[in-house]
Amino acid sequence: MNPLLIPVLGIACGIVAIVFGIANDMFKRWLKHKEAMTQVIAAQTAEQAAQYAAHVERLEQRVRVLERIVTDRGIAVADEIEQLRDAPLN
């Protein structure tokens, strides 16, 4: 075996250990960043879902009012529509 090979392998192992240590640290930082971004996106998604739910609730209330108008005054509204159809156009 070549006597020069042992020191070269020792240095190479040291360099590999340093590179893996740096890569490990970089990976941990990247993973923390991804976790933080996931939390931000989840918070934004929850806020949008709450806004959509509030909007849907308002629309449902309006539909309920319209249904009440139509059912309470259904016959009168139908008569008014028929009168407008029969009215002469000016």
Image (spheres, rainbow, N blue to C red):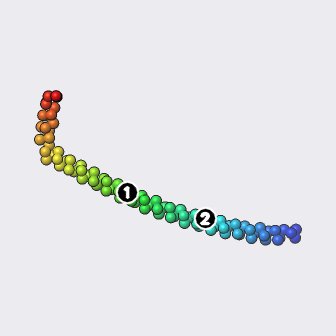
Residue annotated with mark 1: 49
Could you tell me residue 3's position as x and y percent? 87, 70
Which quarter of the figure has residue 21?
Answer: bottom right
Q: State whether residue 18 is above or below residue 49.
A: below
Q: Which residue is mark 2?
A: 27
Query: Residue at point 15% right, 34% down?
Result: 84
Task: Tell me where residue 86 appears, x and y as whole percent.
Answer: 13, 30
Mark count: 2
Q: Quadrant of the C terminus?
A: top left
Q: Earlier in the sequence, mark 1 or mark 2?
A: 2
- Vertical arrangement, residue 84 with respect to residue 47, above or below: above
Instruction: Name the residue type under label 1.
Output: Ala
Between the residue at mark 1 and the residue at mark 2, the CA separation in whole angstroms equals 32 Å
In this rendering, the answer to whether 58 lies above or below 86 is: below
- The residue type indicated by label 2 comes to Phe
Residue occupying the point 59% across, 67% down: 28
Q: Are marks 1 and 2 in contact (CB under 8 Å)?
A: no
Tell which residue pokes out farthest to the front in this image: 90
Determine the secondary structure under disc 2.
helix
How crowded is the residue under tag 1: few (<14 C-alpha within 10 Å), some, or many (20+)?
A: few
Q: Residue at x 17, y 49 (%)?
A: 68
